[in-house]
Image: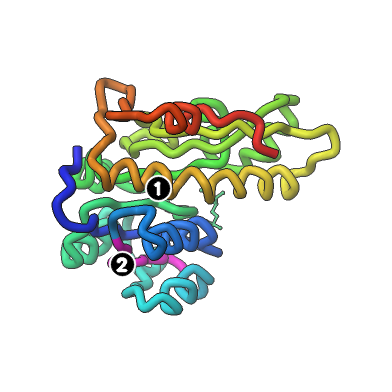
Amino acid sequence: MHTPSSPLRIAVLISGGGSNLQALIDACEAGIIPGRIVLVISNHPTAFGIERAKRHQIATHVVDHRLYPNRESFDQELIRLLDQYETQLVCLAGFMRVLSDHFTHHYANRLINIHPALLPAFPGLHVQQRAIEAGVRFSGATVHFVVPEVDAGPIIVQAVVPVLADDNAETLAARILRQEHRLYPLAVRWFAEGRLQIVGNQVRLLNAQEDEQAALIHPLSA
Ligand code: GRF
């Protein structure tokens, strides 16, 4: 558990548009998260999220996975940069690379991810399309601590989103994304406040107010 003393040093790993990164940047700048984003890393040189970070004077690095002979050497470079910036929390935000066990162990309990489904349902890729094909009436978003197994690990917060009859993958993804932008800053704020306690596979929110309890299970936000 993080013990807050000075503002939390956050790094965000992205591969694409970075709308979740933007939500985190905005929440830090608004003082909602008692922390600041000290580094953004993308594995894609053209990721728009890099542009977003630069607009807010945040340090950026591109670590192109294609230039590394294997996963371990790529991850080692990520670790080198993250440690160089004295990162206290690593946020995966649309980062499309599977991380090695070495990486997840190195940042154990200070590495979190956002996933556009209600885990443990629909891990992996193309989750909105798969949710529609499965005929589920509800999907959503999950923020969770990262463990070696992909899209697993103690769940911090989830939001439920309805799947509508005429949804396609894009319309559902957009509805889920709106909730992601609410959830991720909330989870990072709780971490920065030192209020997330991992007990086995569960996460306890310490000193939860009534409205925060509701936020943990926020239903049906269309
Ligand atoms: C989000 O849906 C996130 O849950 C998933 O990838 C997407 C990234 O979107 N892991 P953005 O780059 O934050 O806009």
Of labels 1 and 2, the one closer to you: 2
What residue do we see at 36% from left, 31% from top?
153
Residue range in magenta is 36-44
Task: Please provide percent x and percent y for residue 52.
Answer: 48, 72
Q: Which labelled disc corresponds to residue 39? A: 2
Front residue of this view, candidates 191 and 213: 213
How far across and how far down the image is residue 64, in percent? 39, 69
How many discs mark residues in the rendered view?
2
Which residue in the protein does label 1 denote?
Answer: 98
Find residue 3 and report its horizontal and vertical position in percent.
Answer: 16, 43
- In the image, taking residue 138 as reference, residue 13 lies left or right, namely left
Q: Quadrant of the C terminus?
A: top right
Amino acid type indicated by mark 2: Leu
Residue 41 is a magenta residue: yes
* Mark 1 secondary-structure assignment: loop
Picture layout, residue 119 above or below residue 37: above
